[in-house]
Image (cartoon, coloured by chain):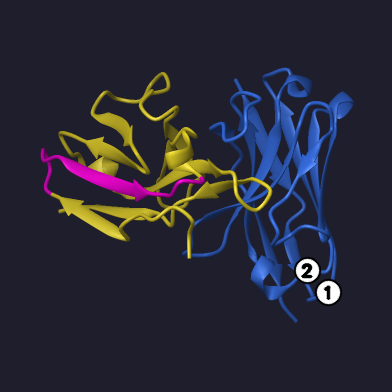
Amino acid sequence: EVQLVESGGGLVQPGGSLRLSCAASGFTFSSYDMHWVRQATGKGLEWVSAIGTAGDTYYPGSVKGRFTISRENAKNSLYLQMNSLRAGDTAVYYCARAAIAVAGTDFDYWGQGTLVTVSS
Amino acid sequence: QSVLTQPPSVSGAPGQRVTISCTGSSSNIGAGYDVHWYQQLPGTAPKLLIYGNSNRPSGVPDRFSGSKSGTSASLAITGLQAEDEADYYCQSYDSSLSGSIVFGGGTKLTVL
């Protein structure tokens, strides 16, 4: 059974940093592109970052230069290093598996999410 | 402002049919990129409902169907059930601004 379990969320002050983790199991982690998607309370979904099987990374303009996605295949783990955090980054952060390695593919499995709150 | 536009809410009585639209542009849906749909029940993570415009993952009832035409896509739900009450999101890819995965703003389905 595919499982994605996020951790590392919490309360952080504006300008601070936080590192999220996503533990994957039930599939060959190294063979899949992985993504982070966030959702502010009562709002819609927003794509945050992606990492390919070769370690190539992608970000939208809203987080580029502040967030860094990485993976450690030996530990079946995905990470999101978030720096220079702003109030607007407050959200539940989900890790999600890309179904296939094609731009715009669907996300066939999602974690339960971890809440990040940026506030003083 | 989402790149893909969905109605904020739709409603229907049990047993009825409802549709949710997802309108994009020539840089996303109109460029030929696939549209996918997710269902998000209250307090839970999104769940893949339709992929590749019209395909259902294993376990998704055939009451759910998707279609795409031009710069728009639609999700149809027939035989509406109380358990279908949820938020629904469309997703695609946009080739502008260095490429990006884009979502619709979401549609709240209320079963009357």
Please name the residue shown 43% across and 49% down the image: B25
- Is A7 above or below relative to A103? below
**Looking at the image, do the residues carrying marks 2 and 1 touch, with CB atoms under 8 Å apart?**
yes
Question: Which residue is identified by label 2?
Answer: A85
Q: Which residues are magenta?
A: B13-27
Count the numbered circles shown.
2
Distance of label 2 from label 1 (alpha carbons):
5 Å
Please name the residue shown 12% across and 43% down the image: B14
Viewer-nearest residue: B52 or A79: B52
Residue A56 location, x and y as percent? 82, 35
Which of marks 1 and 2 precedes in the sequence?
1
Q: Is residue A83 magenta?
A: no
Location of residue A97 by image quarter: top right
Residue B54 location, x and y as percent? 35, 26
Judge the density around disc 2: few (<14), some (14-19), many (≥20) Cα neighbours within 10 Å: many
The circle on residue A15 is: 1
Q: Is residue B20 magenta?
A: yes
Please name the residue shown 83% across and 59% down the image: A65
The blue one among the chains is A
Left or right of B92 on screen, residue B49: left
Q: Amino acid at mark 2?
A: Leu
Residue A28 location, x and y as percent? 73, 17
Judge the density around disc 1: few (<14), some (14-19), many (≥20) Cα neighbours within 10 Å: some
Q: Label 1's element?
A: loop
Q: Chain of mark 2?
A: A
Q: Amino acid at mark 1?
A: Gly
Location of residue A32 by image quarter: top right
Instruction: State the hue of chain B.
Output: yellow
